[in-house]
Each structure stands twice: as C-alpha cells, then as structure tokens.
Amino acid sequence: MLRIGLSAAEYNIHRITIHLPESQTGKEFTRDGVSSFYKGHEMLEMIQRAALALGLTNYTAEAERRGKDIYLTSIRPDEPGEVPEEKTVPKNSVTFGADAEYMIFGTGTERPKAVQINSGRAEADTDDALIRKGYNFYKPVFELRPSPASSGEELHSNLLSLYSKAVRQAGLISAEIRGGANPFGRFMLGGHFHFGSLQPSFRKTKELDAFLAIPWALTENRQEAGRRKSTWGCLGNVRSNRFGGFEYRTLSSWAGKIPGARPLFTYMAWLVKQGNLPSPEIPDRILAAFAEDDREELLQYTEEVFIKLLQTFRGEGDRAAITGFKNYIKRNMSGF
C-alpha cells in the first residue's frame, strides 16, 4: 500500500507527503520524485481532478494505492492563501504539441502487432504499455510525437507528415494503423494536446472540458468510448509538463483521423488562447450524460455551446475557427 498526501492551490503544489508501509511518518517529495512510485503521478492527478470537481481552490487531500487500484481517502478545503496567480501570457508565446496513441493491425485482422522490448529503433515510437507472451514482453501501443508548433495549423502539418510515414510503414507489412478510444483489449488510447508557456488553471481545464471534450465525444465510437471514460477519458484529465505548461489528456486518440482533422487543431489552438470565453461551468445533467455517453443530451449541449461562442465572438478569424470545428463535429458524429 502507498499513501500520498497533497497540499495545493489548484495545480500549484505546496507539499507532497508520501507514507510508505514500513514508515510511521511521511516523507516530503517533489513532483518529479513521485514518478519513482508506481502510479504516483496518477494519484496526484486523481486528487487534482477531485478538487476541480468540488470547486476547491486551496485543498489538502490524501489518496491510497492498494495493488493497482487508487482511492481518494480524504479531501478538505484549506484556508485561502498562496492562490496561484493568473499570468497573462502573450498569445504568440504559447506553443503547441501533441502525442497521438495508435495500434497497428494486420489488414483484415483484429489482432494488434507489437514490438519486443529492447529490440531497436522501432521501440522509440512506442508507449509504455506492455503485453507478455511467454517469457518475453512486447509494446503494442505506438505514438505520433510531432515537433512543437506555434499554431494549430503548423501542429497539424507536423502530425500529417508523421501520420503519412506511419501509414506507409504499416503498408509494407500489410497492416494499418488505428486510433480511437479502445481498439483492442485493455488498451485505452488518447489524443493528448500539450501547451507550453501556458500556466494550467482550473478555469482553463473547465474551458477545455466544456468547449472541446464534450463536442469531441460526439465523434467517438460508442462502444469504445464508454470503456475509456471510466479511466483516462474522464473530464479534467490534466498533467503539468516541464515546459511551463500542461497536457490535456481527456480526448480519445484522433490518430486515424489526422488527414481531415485540421479544423480540430485550428479550434484547439484558438480556444486555449482566449481570455474572455463564456462561463465553462457544466450542468450536472451534462456531466452525467458525458459519463453515461448519452449522445442526445451531449448533442443538445454542444449546439448550445456553439451558439454561445458565436454570440460572444464576432471577429472573422474567431468565427472561422468556431464554425470550422462545429462543421467538423457535424460531419464526424457517431452513434446516432
């Protein structure tokens, strides 16, 4: 068993305390130090998501890991103090990155291909997920990792080059690449966006949940989406990064949709740069609809979101980004 205590203001960590089974007292660790413990980062992120959901700006909480399972054991508000200061970041200083997870399947088959660990260059493009065959371990999940970009369009171009290369390489072995939420077994795939020089905040996370993740849910494979939402696909899935920014991890993998997904990237970049978006508070009925994958409720909410955004922003570039994403969602809706 592992027990972690966290005292923080939003994503600004004041103190991390780890209690080991053999120790009577806790020991303080840095965020990087937590990575040496199995599921340490996941425990911190669970606490932060709970504080976000409860609206706690300053909080102290504890989580426990028992085997592979993580539990939130306590959380309470702290007295106001050391509230993270919102920093005004010039729009042109934000950088955009991504990693899109995918699997490779033989054409016409439903069994994924995998790379044996310690087997050479190909392993550099894999995720940490493992499968075991006899005495050997293999990696079945791959990632597209583009160079950082200064715009959504540039990020899409970088990804398109990597995607085209991956498709060509798969074709040489009569295979194809697949993204999605859960294309096989226990493997949940994500399409993660990275933001550099943009301080994470509960407000920005709520904006990404309300204005990006919920509309995107309408495009997901219905059967796969429900399984991922109970793990990595939950709302508010954020991880701080080493570039003075954060990673938004709620979306399922869009790896297989990259050729036609330029509106997604344009809108995503537009969204995170906005400082005057409408309130991102999500009604309880929509939170329930997201968890239960109620597409009718999510569609109605999404239509309301786009109306609200178009009423707020009148500039030509703003409206082009919003309308482009709106039309993209409409063209790619699934499960109706």
Image (spheres, helix red, strand yellow):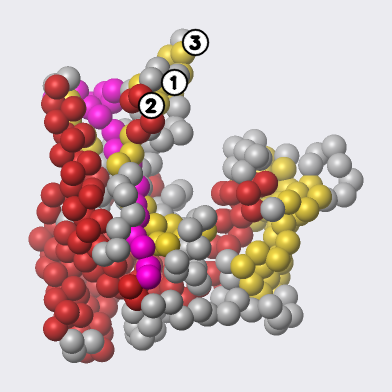
Disc 3 + disc 2, Cβ < 8 Å: no
259, 306: nearer the viewer = 259
Residue placed under numbered mark 3 in the picture: 135
How far apart are labels 1 and 3 at the CA level?
12 Å
> Would residue 22 be visible to someone looking at this image?
yes
How far apart are labels 3 and 2 at the CA level?
18 Å
Q: In the image, residue 202 lies at what x, y percent?
A: 50, 72
Marking on residue 123: 2
Assign a secondary structure to mark 1. Answer: loop
Q: Nearer the viewer, mark 1 or mark 3?
A: 1
Looking at the image, residue 169 sits to the left or right of residue 94; the answer is left
The boundaries of the magenta stretch are 93-113
50, 192: nearer the viewer = 192
Asked if residue 108 is among those painted magenta in the image, a careful observer would answer: yes
First of labels 1, 3 by sequence position: 1
Quadrant the N terminus occupies: top right
Q: Which residue is outermost to the top? A: 134
Mark 1 crowdedness (10 Å alpha carbons): few <14, some 14-19, many ≥20: some
Mark 3 crowdedness (10 Å alpha carbons): few <14, some 14-19, many ≥20: few
The three-letter code of the residue at mark 1 reads Ile
Picture layout, residue 71 above or below residue 15: above
> Would residue 217 be visible to someone looking at this image?
no
Disc 1 + disc 2, Cβ < 8 Å: yes
Name the residue located 43 percent from the left edge and 14 percent from the top edge: 133
Assign a secondary structure to mark 3. Answer: loop
Q: In the image, residue 113 lies at what x, y percent?
A: 29, 23
Quadrant the C terminus occupies: bottom left
Name the residue located 50 percent from the left edge and 56 percent from the top edge: 241
